[in-house]
Image: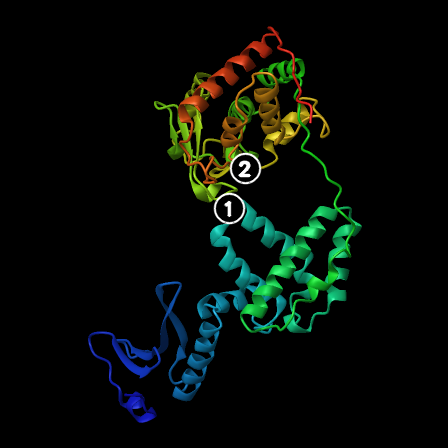
């Protein structure tokens, strides 16, 4: 039975909150104090949710029904009306609900559940800095290809060609989302294929010659900066995980007695859990560091406070202070170092190496290996690698590299 204006006016509060239902999920919530709120109950993504539609009498029965119908149209298009409202608020109340910024924030909120936090924050930062100031308030269906090109060419103009390509890709994904949710009919960004300068392919700078690796390890041992940063530097070659994975490491993920680090799927680029066996040398460094940072969440907390991890530039800045230039060594370079030397010098099986690098590796039947695949062999490899690094650090025997002929 639907509500009437008379029934709403005559509704009296009681000692408990009352709900007067109107239909299609909408009801009037009457509090013991006499307040009256319009609510919409709906389901999205398998979860029951609530949406406020205003207060009575400021929002009349007719107004509440109009808001309910608008929200249900969004649901029919695959849009969560609650998230859409948050996006409108984040973009500014004065902006139209179909503006590029509002829809981009909706898209970001929906997709970020599948992204690593750092990746999600970088995408939003790029949109906020390079797109929203020029296109954010524009109705998404009215922005022509030329204006998207003008916007990303500003990024090209400062020499960031790769970033320009990425931003244009994000814009295209937002447009596809707008089409899917009924706010646009076509994707003008698709017309810009080939319009940007090509990205010059580069590789992360890395030291891969054994003698030079020994010099780097000795420089790390002599590092005079923060003890936390020094420990990160010492662990980087031993673990050869991605820089973001290292700096976001949490003590709860480590089993030092079992000599392993369990990284959850949400922190990994491939969205699969990963296991890093710890050589005795790595365990020793972590036990020493635990005395300093073990009472907090992060293994490598920020110098600004323990509630966030160290800066993504901490290891890179330390390398520069040690005299290694950007074309000599990078944070990612420890991965290339391990991959090259484990293969060409120590001759471990390539699939063991690739699996330990958390790359996509398939078994003979085409299935992805799980996190514990070849664990015993990988433990031996990580210990052998750590022992070899110790040999290089003291200037011991340097085995020759045997590069494969392609």
Say which quadrant the N terminus sits in. bottom left
Q: Is residue 210 left or right of residue 180?
A: right
Say which residue appears at 47% left-offset and 69% top-offset.
Answer: 78
Q: Quadrant of residue 255?
A: top left
Q: Is residue 58 visible?
A: no
Q: Residue drawn at (65%, 61%), measured in percent from left and top?
A: 132
Residue farthest toward the top in the current orientation of the protein: 396
> Which residue is rendered at x = 39% and y = 23% of the image?
259
Could you tell me which secondary element the residue under label 1 belongs to? loop
Q: Position of residue 275 (x, y in %)?
A: 43, 32
Query: Which numbered disc covers residue 56?
Result: none
Q: Quadrant of the C terminus?
A: top right
The numbered dot on residue 244 is 2
Q: Is residue 176 above or below residue 293?
A: below
> As displayed, is residue 16 above or below residue 170?
below
Given the current orientation, which residue lies at the most extreme bottom position? 6
Depth check: give the residue in front, 208 or 62: 208
Q: Residues within 10 Å of mark 2 (few under 14, many from 20)?
A: many
Seen in the picture, residue 6 relative to 105 is either above or below; the reply is: below
**Which residue is more in the foreground, 343 or 296?**
343
Label 2 with label 1: CB-CB less than 8 Å: yes
Query: Could you classify mark 1 by the number of other residues whose Cα lies within 10 Å: few (under 14), some (14-19), or many (20 or more)?
Result: some
Return the residue nearer the eye: 279 or 371. 371
In the figure, is residue 167 to the left or right of 299? Answer: right
Q: Between residues 326 and 353, which one lies in front from this camera angle?
A: 353
| Residue picked out by circle 1 | 116
Separation of marks 2 and 1 at Cα, in angstroms: 10 Å
Look at the numbered disc 2 and give the secondary structure of its residue.
helix
The image quadrant that residue 379 belongs to is top left
């Amino acid at each position: 039975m639907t509500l009437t204006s008379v029934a709403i006016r005559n509704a009296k509060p009681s000692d408990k909150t009352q709900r007067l239902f109107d239909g299609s999920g909408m009801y009037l919530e009457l509090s013991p104090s006499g307040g009256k709120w319009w609510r919409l109950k709906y389901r999205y993504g398998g979860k029951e949710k609530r949406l406020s539609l205003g207060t009575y009498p400021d929002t009349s029965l007719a107004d509440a029904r109009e808001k309910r119908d608008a929200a249900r149209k969004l649901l029919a298009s695959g849009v969560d009306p609650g998230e859409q409202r948050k996006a409108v608020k984040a973009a500014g109340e004065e902006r139209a609900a179909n503006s590029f910024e509002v829809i981009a924030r909706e898209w970001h909120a929906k997709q970020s559940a599948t992204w690593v936090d750092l990746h999600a924050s970088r995408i939003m930062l790029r949109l906020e800095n390079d797109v929203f100031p020029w296109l954010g308030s524009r109705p998404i269906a009215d922005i022509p290809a030329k204006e998207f090109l003008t916007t990303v060419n500003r990024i090209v103009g400062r020499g960031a060609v790769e970033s320009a390509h990425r931003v244009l890709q994000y814009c295209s994904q937002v447009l596809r989302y707008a089409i899917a949710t009924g706010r646009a009919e076509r994707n003008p960004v698709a017309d810009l294929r080939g319009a940007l300068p090509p990205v010059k392919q580069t590789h992360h700078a890395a030291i891969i010659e054994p003698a030079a690796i020994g010099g780097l390890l000795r420089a790390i041992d002599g590092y005079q900066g923060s003890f936390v940063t020094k420990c990160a530097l010492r662990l980087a070659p031993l673990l050869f995980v991605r820089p973001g994975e290292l700096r976001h490491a949490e003590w709860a993920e480590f089993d030092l007695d079992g000599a392993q680090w369990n990284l959850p799927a949400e922190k990994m680029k491939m969205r699969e859990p990963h296991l890093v066996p710890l050589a005795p040398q790595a365990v020793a460094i972590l036990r020493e560091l635990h005395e300093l940072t073990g009472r907090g969440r992060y293994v490598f907390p920020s110098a600004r406070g323990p509630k966030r991890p160290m800066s993504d530039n901490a290891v890179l800045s330390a390398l520069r202070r040690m005299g290694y230039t950007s074309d000599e060594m990078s944070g990612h370079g420890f991965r290339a170092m391990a991959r090259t030397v484990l293969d060409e010098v120590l001759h471990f099986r390539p699939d063991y190496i690739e699996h330990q690098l958390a790359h996509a590796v398939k078994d003979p039947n085409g299935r992805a290996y799980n996190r514990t695949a070849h664990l015993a062999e990988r433990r031996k490899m990580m210990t052998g690698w750590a022992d070899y690094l110790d040999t290089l650090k003291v200037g011991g025997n340097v085995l020759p590299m045997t590069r494969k002929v392609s």
